[in-house]
Amino acid sequence: MPARPLPPKPSAEVPADPRCRRGFRPEFFPLCDGVKPPPPGATDTVARRQIEFLAAYYELNVLYAKLEAVRRKRGEAQGLLKKIAEALRARDQLEDRYAPEGFLGEPEMDGLFFRNVKFTHARAGAVAPAVETSFSLFVPLVLPKGLTLRQYIERELGLPGRRRPRAKKSPLGRR
């Protein structure tokens, strides 16, 4: 009997927003901080990460609903439990990826289902500066008569004013 291929591991890439997929069930998509989630095409970094978390919890909600239906019919749930374990690992990996930078999603549950995800992140309290500032400094340099800037640099600062071509390396690495 040939060996069965291993199931694919969850991708580290940003998953597609489940709201754009066929068969989307809106009752399983959690709220975002108690309100409507960011739009599917959001490009803001925080909104994209929120969508990632909401998508992970949506997948878990769908799987838990299927598990509930299978158990009501007293069916076999072994395959479904494996899918739930994979989805939980994917969610944990997502949390691990963003936790070092202070981006966390704390789910609120209603029974078996995730109904809302409260987010905390380092950028939440960041306030943009009221005024942009810049700084410049002008230092007048008076050159002695008869000297060019290049000559002055060479003489006074001890720095070479001209660019010299680099020495070619020999094939053996010796000069």
Image (tube, rainbow, N blue to C red):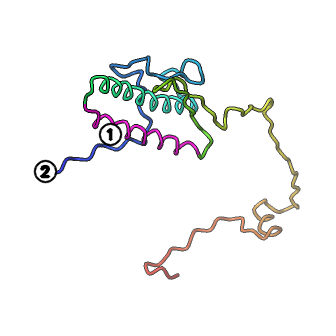
Q: Label 2 near label 1: C-beta < 8 Å?
A: no
Q: Is residue 91 left or right of residue 44?
A: left
Query: Which residue is rendered at x = 57% and y = 33% of the image?
Result: 106
Q: Is residue 125 above or below residue 159?
A: above
Q: Position of residue 139 (x, y in %)?
A: 87, 51
Query: Which amino acid type corresponds to the residue marked 1 in the rendered image?
Result: Lys
Query: Which residue is rendered at x = 55% and y = 27% of the image?
Result: 108
Q: Is residue 28 left or right of residue 121?
A: left
Q: Which mark is residue 2?
A: 2
User: Which of the pair 75/153 is nearer the observer?
Assistant: 75
Q: Position of residue 158 (x, y in %)?
A: 78, 71
Query: Which residue is rendered at x = 52% and y = 44% of the image?
Result: 97
Element type where label 1 sits in the image: helix
Query: Which residue is rendered at x = 83% and y = 68% of the image?
Result: 156
Q: Quadrant of residue 142?
A: bottom right
Q: Is residue 44 left or right of residue 128?
A: left
Query: Which amino acid type corresponds to the residue marked 2 in the rendered image?
Result: Pro
Q: Is residue 55 magenta?
A: no
Crowding around mark 2 (Cα neighbors within 10 Å: few <14, some 14 to 19, many 20+) is: few
Write down the residue under mark 1.
82
Report the magenta residues as a range. Answer: 76-99
| Viewer-nearest of discs 1 and 2 | 1
Crowding around mark 1 (Cα neighbors within 10 Å: few <14, some 14 to 19, many 20+) is: few
